[in-house]
Image (cartoon, grey):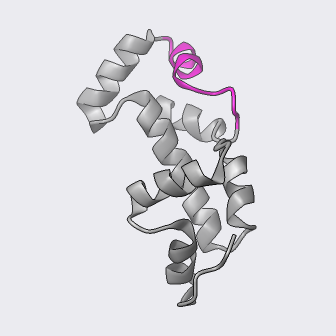
Amino acid sequence: RQVTESIEAHLTDEQFGVEPLAEMVEMSTTHLNRKLKALIGQKAGKLIRSMRLQRAADLIAQEAGNISDIAYQYCFSDPTNFARAFKVQFGVAPSQYRGQMTGDSAPHSD
């Protein structure tokens, strides 16, 4: 719980990653990764990325800005990398996701 709360508090912080998270929860990065892998099946870096993508998906569904701006807000330096990671996690491109969530069948061009 402390791990997810720490990640939530730093989702838009570009400097936040596995090492700062490990320091916050007073564990080595190795121990943190082992513990998370055993508990939830993911290492810390993947969990951080997954939580960032989920928060970005929430904003995309709410139409709270354009997709590129949302990608940058959640620490993706390149909208193409964001779109690729988003599709891996959610099975659709961000623009298609927005269309599905808002009932708009035409994809938005962002």
Location of residue 43 (image quadrant): top left
Q: Residue 18: horizontal and vertical position, in percent? A: 51, 23
Residue 19, above or below 47: above
Q: Nearer the viewer, residue 80 or 9?
A: 80
Q: Residue at x 50, y 67 (%)?
A: 93
Outermost front residue? 80
The N terminus sits in image quarter:
top left
Q: Position of residue 110 (x, y in %)?
A: 69, 69
Is 50 located above or below residue 34 in the figure? below
Residue 6, above or below 77: above
Place of residue 41 in the rendered image (x, y in percent of width and height, measured from the top left): 27, 36
Total numbered labels placed on residues in the image: 0
Residue 44 is at least partly visible in this image: yes
Q: Residue at x 58, y 82 (%)?
A: 107
Q: Is residue 1 visible?
A: no
Q: Which residue sits at x=72%, y=49%?
A: 73
Relative to 43, is 66 on the left or the right? right
* Residue 34, image x, y percentages: 30, 20
Up-down relation of residue 56 to residue 107 (above or below): above
Q: Nearer the viewer, residue 81 or 50?
A: 81
> Residue at the spot x=38%, y=65% of the render?
91
Q: Which residues are magenta?
A: 13-26
Is 53 positioned to the left or the right of 41 in the image? right
